[in-house]
Image (tube, rainbow, N blue to C red):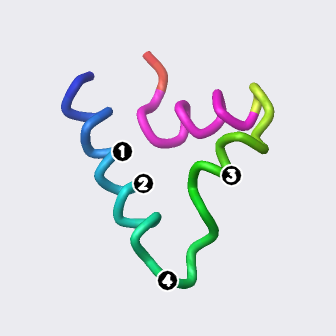
Amino acid sequence: MTARLQQLMKRLDAAADADDTPDVSAKIEAATADDIFDLIDNEIGTR
């Protein structure tokens, strides 16, 4: 689980570094709870 979260963080960091990518923190702040849970389910998976 820890490794998966670290991979997700690396991908988010890489996306934040891209010039044409909107600010990741702004996306997170604008996201609803359902959006966050969907992200977690899609990126990490459910058990």
**The N terminus appears in which quarter of the rendering?**
top left
Seen from the viewer's position, the closer of residues 25 and 8 is: 25
The part of the image, by quadrant, that contains residue 44 is top left
Write down the residue under mark 1.
8
At label 4, the amino acid type is Asp
Write down the residue under mark 2.
12
Magenta stretch: includes residue 39: yes
Write down the residue under mark 4.
19
Does the CB distance between marks 1 and 2 fall below 8 Å? yes
As measured in the structure, the alpha-carbon distance from the residue carrying label 1 to the one carrying label 4 is 19 Å
- Label 4 or label 2, whichever lies nearer to me, is 4
At label 2, the amino acid type is Leu
Give the residue displayed 42% in from the left and 54% down from the top.
12
The image shows residue 20, relative to residue 23, as above or below, that is below
Does the CB distance between marks 3 and 2 fall below 8 Å? no
At label 1, the amino acid type is Leu
| Magenta-colored span | 35-45
